[in-house]
Image (tube, rainbow, N blue to C red):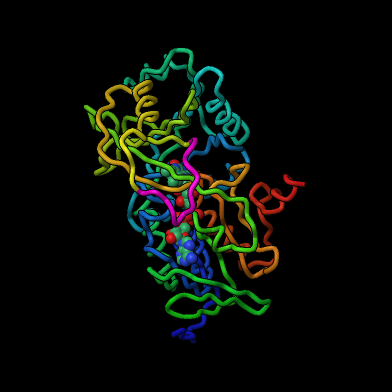
Amino acid sequence: MTIATTRPFDVIVLGGGTMGSGAALALARRGQRVLVLEQFTTPSSMASHSGRTRIIRQAYFESPAYVPMVREADRLWVEIGAEVGQTLLHRCGGLDISAPGETQAESARESAVQWDVPYEWLDGAEVNRRWSQFHLPDDWSACYSPVTGFLDVEPGLTAMRSLAEGAGAVWHEHEPALDWQATPSGVTVTTGQGTYTADRLVVSAGAWAATALRGLGLPLTVRRKLLWWYEMGDRAAYMADRFPVLIAGMPGCQLYVIPISGDDPGLKAGDHAGGDETAADDLRRQIDDDEADSVTEAMRTLVHGVGAITDRQVCMYTMTPDEDFIVDRHPEYDNVTFAAGFSGHGFKFAPAMGEHLADLSSDPAARPIPHIALARLAQAVS
Ligand SMILES: Cc1cc2nc3c(=O)[nH]c(=O)nc-3n(C[C@H](O)[C@H](O)[C@H](O)COP(=O)(O)OP(=O)(O)OC[C@H]3O[C@@H](n4cnc5c(N)ncnc54)[C@H](O)[C@@H]3O)c2cc1C
């Protein structure tokens, strides 16, 4: 039986993952009464934030347009960490490197130059001299930025959630939203437990965005992605105080490597490219040994001392055609805002994206950011 709740909310956040936690925090801090509906838990290994750590970088190879927001996110992650008494952002520095003919390092340098992000331009031999853990071919290039680092995912989301709850947000876990309706005067969200009403809705459903935003026809595809942890002979040499983040554009793989942190089961690596298309509910969670082959080969090409695989994890990217996010108001309902299609690079933005979602949701004068607005997709198609 459906029970209509009498509890009044200003905003319902559908999906309490990465962006939902950021939005709930920003909205609750503005004095909004927030209800978060999450089908699993916050955080959850079933969503797109599984796998312990995420890279944060300002020499942004995807496009210089992201740099202002990533800087704001960086500042907020440090601030949130200070509020909860934890270091959430480990600033170990990072290398974007290119094999001859690849553009990874050059694209990172372009953003650094445009926005005055600190960086150094190195060749493979210089990288090997500075970090003896690497054996890069001499003719590779590297853009090293000392402000790159990585974030602890579960403590990061838990921190945003607890601060949001401290500001009055209400979190309902294990409560999937089954349907929602909007009219100019408000929104209604139905779950198996009840029907909730509010003035506004924020949809941040990650890999389930296409279902949650049915009718919008967003051009999203979900990809199955894998993460691997490798045993390293000298574990201490691969921790954040001695080893940088690495992203490598190389034939057959866009390898990324994140230093060992805390009780990590080893050095973490994955391939940013590729991944089988799937539906979120059909994701194959079993991982076969031979699925690591291209990542292991890339690791052994670049890094000394790569041992056996100690752990693995499955995750999902929700891709847009241009790999830029889609964050906007719903074209039919001004009181519905959504954030989707984070294309495998969204985590670092969460607190800043939360502020942007709160702006779009509660301030009629706020404008979408052009390169992640819905309108640019229509322009791209027309
Ligand atoms: C392997 C891998 C590596 C990555 N590396 C990086 C990196 O280094 N740096 C970086 O910045 N980003 C990285 N990313 C990307 C980043 O993790 C994602 O872009 C980000 O987590 C997406 O946030 P989201 O809020 O859209 O999705 P999620 O965090 O998955 O949140 C969506 C939430 O909505 C919930 N939900 C969906 N439907 C419903 C419903 N009907 N009712 C209730 N709840 C619902 C889901 O359960 C989920 O919790 C990586 C991603 C993967 C998979």
Left-right relation of 59 to 262: right
Total marks shown come to: 0
The image shows residue 219 at horizontal and vertical percentages of: 62, 51
Q: Residue at x 49, y 39 (%)?
A: 57
Q: Is residue 87 visible?
A: yes
Q: Is residue 277 magenta?
A: yes
Q: Main secondary structure of the magenta part?
A: loop
Q: Is residue 89 magenta?
A: no
Along the line of sight, the residue nearer the viewer: 37 or 133 = 37
Q: Is residue 142 above or below residue 314?
A: above
The image shows residue 68 at horizontal and vertical percentages of: 59, 45
* Residue situated furthest right in the rendering: 382
Q: Which residues are magenta?
A: 273-285
Locate the N terminus by quadrant: bottom left
Q: Residue at x 49, y 54 (%)?
A: 207
Q: Is residue 18 visible?
A: no
Q: Is residue 206 above or below residue 303?
A: below
Q: Is residue 106 above or below residue 328?
A: above
* Residue situated furthest left in the rendering: 233
The image shows residue 306 at horizontal and vertical percentages of: 28, 26
